[in-house]
Amino acid sequence: MEVSTRFGPLLLLILAAALLCREALAAKHVVGGSQGWDESVDFDSWASARIFKVGDELEFKYTAGLHSVVELAGESAYKSCDIGSALDSLNGGSNTVKLSKSGTRYFTCGTPGHCEQGMKVKITTAAADGSSSTTTSPSSKGAAPSTSAASAHVQFLGFFALVASLLVSLI
């Protein structure tokens, strides 16, 4: 009985650390960087400067009423700016989209003419291990840094070291 009482808190902390691990490694990418979701951003350069992984989030920040976020059905709709077969449409001014599986997703602004002016972005999400992802050097236009998985990993390691030191003090 003494063993289970003594190691109960240890097991709870290990379980909590395991559950937090997945979220700690996820990154939040503000689409368009400091300029946000706006027609002045070069979204091709912005997206190519980042690695998107399963569990990451895209945050679209924009002026409600002036812009919106429309998720397109596929590459053909993306290339032709066809929002008629949209999968989703968001218009609140600040929207978060979770990247829950690997693959490519396409987003544009639903305001007439904005897609044709380049206000669209193609996001290719790699598996959580990043096995199919490549990166290029960031562009200076619209390439404000986002929370990276690497810095989240360092934060998690710091958290894990703190938990480990607490566990050692309990033993």
Image (cartoon, rainbow, N blue to C red):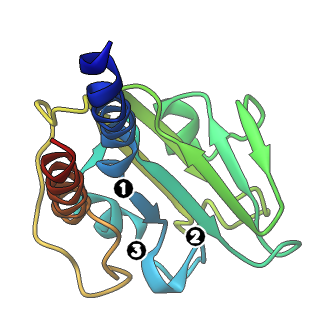
Q: Marks 2 and 3: which is nearer the front?
A: 3
Picture mark count: 3
Residue that label 2 marks: 117
Identity, as a three-letter code, of the amino acid under mark 1: Ala
Residue that label 1 marks: 27
Mark 2–mark 3 CB contact (< 8 Å):
no
Apparent side of residue 13 relative to residue 153 in the rendered image (left or right): right
Residue that label 3 marks: 42
Q: Earlier in the sequence, mark 1 or mark 2?
A: 1
- Locate residue 98, reporting x and y percent: 53, 41
- Locate residue 83, reporting x and y percent: 72, 41
Instruction: Classify mark 2: helix, strand or loop.
Output: loop
- Residue 101: which quarter of the image? top left
Q: Quadrant of the N terminus?
A: top left
Q: Residue at x 11, y 46 (%)?
A: 134
Q: Earlier in the sequence, mark 3 or mark 1?
A: 1
Q: Residue at x 62, y 60 (%)?
A: 115
Q: In the rendered image of this protein, does residue 148 appear above or below residue 102?
A: below
- Locate residue 69, reporting x and y percent: 70, 55
- Locate residue 88, reporting x and y percent: 74, 36
Q: Earlier in the sequence, mark 2 or mark 3?
A: 3
- Mark on residue 163? none
Mark 3–mark 1 CB contact (< 8 Å):
no
Crowd around label 3: few <14 · some 14–19 · many ≥20 (10 Å): some
Instruction: Classify mark 1: helix, strand or loop.
Output: loop
Identity, as a three-letter code, of the amino acid under mark 3: Asp
Q: In the rendered image of this protein, does residue 32 appear above or below residue 9?
A: below
- Residue 126: which quarter of the image? top left
Alpha-carbon span between mark 2 and mark 3 = 10 Å
Q: Quadrant of the C terminus?
A: top left
